Image: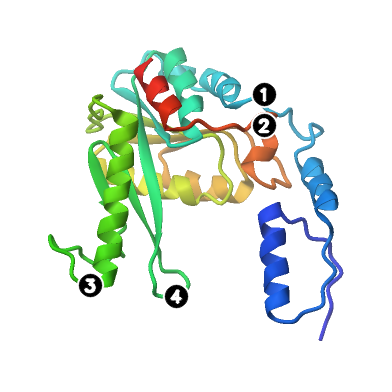
Amino acid sequence: MAICNKSIILTSEDWHICRTAAVAFGMMINFPDQDTQSLSEERIGSTDQIPRFANLRSAGRQLALQLETYRGADGVVILAPVLGGVPVAHEVANHLGKPLDFLIRRQLLLPQGPGSDINAVSVAGRTIIDERAPALPADPLTPLEHFLADAIAGLQSRERICRGTRPPLNLIDKIVILVDCGIHTGGNMRAAVTALRKTESKQIIAAVPVTSHGGRDIVAALADDFVSLASPKPFGHVGLWYDDFSRPGDDEICKLLRL
């Protein structure tokens, strides 16, 4: 068996997954301790590559300057995925003088083996479900149908909490600027853009402060335009590029949407 001695940098979550898998299969592997892992993450998020953003709202103010061309455009809506996207998008909307709304994505892992995850996205007053999901009858009967119905009900309940009495914005024939705090794998933004295509919006612009190269390529291929401030390599994860990566709870989201 060939042995590769190349170094691999893992996130904390990857570290725990690898260690658990090794124990399960009886493998004897020397894993670095968490202090060593933290140092690796610090090196990835080094300011030698790009300056870190102070926090989400600071990143939003910087991103807004790169979207200045949309200030005078008609029919522009700023849309943010909950959670981390809302503070960033709030700053963009304030700077451009455009209305702000949000979407919520929920990933559903179906009991059908690997690759069986689907997405449900609540946006513009609609719940849009991945086309790979089985059709859901009005009265669920099977365990899978009950699972899907409960997940969708939970998604809609959370939107009501975040939205309050504020109605969703109409996205038909609008230029939608989809703003998030960053892109790692591209899965969240891909699901959001795919759902937005079903809202009859005129144009979709994806905009983030920081993105991985792989995530950028995935989302840029789906959106009509793509804007980012930085694409460092190696990337690690989005939170490494913020001094303060605190994300808002539902109460703060409600407050930001009312401003």
The amino acid pointed to by label 2 is Tyr
Q: What residue is drawn where x is 42% and y is 21%?
A: 256
The mark nearer the N terminus, 4 or 1, is 1
Residue where numbered disc 2 is placed: 242
Q: Which mark is residue 142?
A: 3
Q: What residue is drawn where x is 25% and y is 28%?
A: 169
Q: Is label 4 in a helix, a strand or a loop?
A: loop
The one of 30 and 133 positioned closer to us in this rendering: 30
The mark nearer the N terminus, 4 or 3, is 4
Left or right: 23 in relation to 186? right
The one of 134 and 197 positioned closer to us in this rendering: 134
Give the spatial CA distance, label 4 vs label 1.
41 Å
Residue where numbered disc 4 is placed: 113
**Residue 152: % across, % down:** 28, 52
Q: Looking at the figure, which quarter contains the C terminus?
A: top left
The amino acid pointed to by label 1 is Ala
Q: Is the residue marked by circle 4 packed among few (<14), some (14-19), or many (20+) residues within 10 Å?
A: few
